[in-house]
Image: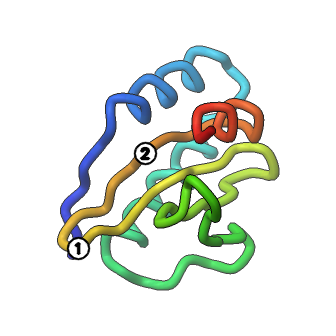
């Protein structure tokens, strides 16, 4: 089982998304389930479109929790690093 490292950006992003009212409690439960699945190194359901990032973000991966709510993370054993979460514009603006 991987240990979770939460980046400062991720904490801010989650707080922003909670306050926005755009995401339901169920959305946050799905996020929690996905993080647990990653932590346990189990395969993520293909409906979440897990894929590696390229270019300057090489080494990171993305998971689409909803069509426009994306989790960016990295696995550096023994760590699961939660980097950021947000919509496409929010996430990719920070990755540049």
Left or right: where 8 falls relative to 64: left
Q: Which element is circle 2 on?
A: strand
**Which residue is pictured at 72% across the width and 37% down the height?**
87
Q: Residue furthest top?
A: 19
The answer to whether the residues at label 2 and label 1 have Cβ atoms under 8 Å apart is no
Left or right of residue 36: residue 43: right
Residue under pointer 1: 77
Residue at 76% across / 33% down in the picture?
89
Does 51 appear above or below 33? below
Q: Residues within 10 Å of mark 1 (few under 14, many from 20)?
A: few
Residue 35 lies, in percent from the top left, at 42, 60
Q: Quadrant of residue 46?
A: bottom right
Q: Residue at x 50, y 61 (%)?
A: 60
Number of labelled discs?
Answer: 2
Instruction: Work out which quarter of the rendered image holds the C terminus and state it.
Output: top right
In the rendered image, residue 4, in percent from the top left (x then y), is placed at: 25, 55
N-terminal of the pair, mark 2 or mark 1, is 1
Quadrant occupied by the N terminus? bottom left
Q: As drawn, is 92 to the left or to the right of 73?
A: right
Instruction: Determine the secondary structure under disc 1.
Output: loop
Residue 88 position, x and y percent, is: 75, 41
Return the residue at label 2. 83
Residue most extreme to the right = 67
């Amino acid at each position: 089982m991987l240990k979770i490292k939460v980046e400062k950006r991720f904490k801010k992003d989650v707080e922003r998304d909670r306050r926005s009212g755009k995401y339901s409690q169920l959305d946050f439960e799905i996020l929690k389930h996905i993080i647990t699945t990653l932590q346990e190194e189990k395969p993520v359901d293909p409906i979440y479109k897990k894929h590696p990032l390229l270019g300057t973000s090489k080494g990171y991966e993305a998971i689409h929790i909803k069509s426009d709510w994306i989790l960016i993370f990295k696995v550096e054993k023994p760590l699961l690093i939660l980097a950021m979460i947000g919509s496409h514009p929010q996430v990719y603006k920070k990755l540049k």
